[in-house]
Image (cartoon, rainbow, N blue to C red):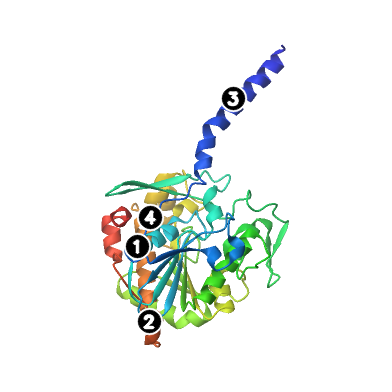
């Protein structure tokens, strides 16, 4: 056997060994995270209950129903639209496990793009999981991708054309759930998930719909409420109330020319008041150093400290970083204020949520105290 063949066989053996070693880690990304039914959960449905076309597909996902049994309105809370934005889905999970309803109904989708939780974004070096310490032991959650797994939807077109508007974007945006609304029943898997969520809003007559997100600290629309025209008064009132609680938050109207996003299409396609919220996640930014679990959890990065000193960021940033507990606290507090303010002019549609920790409690005690 020649030296070249020996080298080739040796390299092949190494490749096979690496594949064998990492396969269990990638396979584990397809194992659903544990979400405990809290005392307020009265039913667990699937998105396919609202759009049967999703049944037995990687796009189907759990919908947690918290029904007070008393007349009132309905609210939808969505996390995991982008599975690499953990404050969104961890906030939704906290609501599932802690919230109680004394009036009206709350529908929670913690992992909207279920397929996106089964893989990572390539070339980003992201962790596959994050671990949160709780009183009952460590809990592990997947840190997924911004987009649907290409194993479940492929190939990407060269140019993605948004079906109902004709807007053109990069081909990979075809797997971005937050560019797919209002969706299509006969479209791609991502469009079908979007369609299912819109059907839920319609069928349950949801009055307020909230989509939880994160963005990089250098992104202008950060620590903000992005609102549909119909939700303008509610968002403005909520922002003032949050300021009174010393939680600074910005207001951004939904652009009418940017299509496919929840805050635009939910409001246009249904009667709901649609709001999207953003918190600051350094693990998503372009200025970050090492990308690892610690960065996701602590939000600490010396490169972002330097950027803050140079005035390059749109949120406060110091040696304390932007920890996940702070980001979750912002989402939970803003959700509670929006729900409280949304139906002031229609008291018969009021939704009352109790049992949820305050902003200060989450910041002081950490997320694990409430999971």
Q: In the drawing, what numbered circle is on residue 141?
A: none
Tag 3 secondary structure: helix
* Residue 273 in the image: above or below residue 134: below
Residue pictured at 63% horizontal, 59% vertical: 189
Q: Which residue carries the number 3 mark?
A: 14
Q: Earlier in the sequence, mark 2 or mark 1?
A: 2
Q: Residues within 10 Å of mark 3 (few under 14, many from 20)?
A: few
Percent of width and height locating residue 284: 49, 53
Q: Earlier in the sequence, mark 2 or mark 3?
A: 3
Asked if the residue at tag 1 contacts the one at tag 2, i.e. Cβ–Cβ closer than 8 Å, the answer is no
Measure the C-alpha gap from mark 4 to mark 2.
Answer: 35 Å
Asked if the residue at tag 4 contacts the one at tag 3, i.e. Cβ–Cβ closer than 8 Å, the answer is no
Q: In the drawing, what numbered circle is on residue 329?
A: 1
Q: Earlier in the sequence, mark 4 or mark 1?
A: 4
Residue at the limit of the structure toward the top, as seen here: 1
Q: Earlier in the sequence, mark 1 or mark 3?
A: 3
Measure the C-alpha gap from mark 2 to mark 1.
Answer: 29 Å
Front tag of 3 and 4: 3
Q: Which residue carries the number 2 mark?
A: 71
Q: Residues within 10 Å of mark 2 (few under 14, many from 20)?
A: some
Q: Which residue carries the number 4 mark?
A: 324
Measure the C-alpha gap from mark 4 to mark 1.
Answer: 8 Å
Q: Nearer the viewer, residue 370 or 243?
A: 370
Residue pictured at 37% horizontal, 50% vertical: 298
Left or right: 365 as drawn, with respect to 326: left
Q: Residues within 10 Å of mark 1 (few under 14, many from 20)?
A: many
Tag 2 secondary structure: loop
* Residue 13 in the image: above or below residue 123: above
Q: Nearer the viewer, residue 135 or 3?
A: 135
């Amino acid at each position: 056997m020649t030296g070249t063949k020996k080298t080739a066989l040796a390299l092949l053996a190494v490749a096979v060994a690496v594949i064998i070693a990492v396969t269990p880690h990638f396979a584990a990304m397809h194992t659903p995270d544990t979400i405990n039914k809290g005392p307020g959960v009265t039913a667990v449905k699937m998105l396919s209950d609202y759009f049967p076309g999703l049944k037995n597909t990687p796009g189907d996902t759990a919908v947690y129903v918290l029904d007070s049994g008393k007349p009132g309105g309905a609210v939808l809370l969505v996390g995991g639209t982008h599975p690499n934005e953990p404050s969104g889905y961890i906030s939704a999970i906290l609501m599932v496990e802690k919230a109680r309803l004394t009036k009206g109904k709350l529908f929670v989708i913690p992992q909207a793009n279920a397929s996106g939780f089964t893989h990572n974004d390539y070339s980003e070096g992201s962790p596959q999981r994050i671990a949160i310490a709780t009183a009952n032991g460590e809990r592990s959650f997947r840190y997924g991708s911004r987009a649907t797994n290409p194993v479940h939807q492929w190939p990407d077109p060269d140019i993605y054309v948004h079906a109902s508007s004709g807007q053109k974007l990069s081909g990979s945006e075809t797997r971005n759930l937050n560019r797919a609304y209002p969706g299509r029943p006969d479209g791609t898997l991502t469009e079908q998930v979007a369609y299912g969520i819109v059907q839920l809003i319609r069928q349950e007559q949801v009055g307020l719909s909230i989509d939880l997100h994160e963005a990089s600290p250098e992104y202008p629309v950060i620590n903000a409420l992005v609102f549909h025209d119909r939700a303008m008064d509610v968002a403005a009132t909520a922002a003032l109330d949050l300021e009174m609680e010393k939680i600074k938050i910005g207001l951004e109207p939904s652009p009418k020319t940017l299509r496919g996003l929840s805050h635009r299409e939910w409001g246009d396609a249904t009667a709901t008041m649609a709001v999207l919220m953003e918190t600051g996640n350094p693990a998503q930014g372009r200025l970050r150093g090492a990308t690892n679990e610690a960065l996701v959890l602590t939000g600490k990065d010396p490169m972002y400290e330097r950027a803050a000193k140079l005035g390059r960021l749109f949120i406060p940033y110091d040696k304390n970083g932007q920890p996940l507990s702070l980001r979750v606290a912002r989402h939970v507090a803003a959700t509670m204020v929006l729900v409280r303010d949304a139906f002031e002019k229609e008291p018969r549609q009021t939704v009352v949520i109790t049992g949820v920790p305050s902003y200060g409690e989450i910041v002081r005690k950490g997320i694990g105290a409430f999971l």
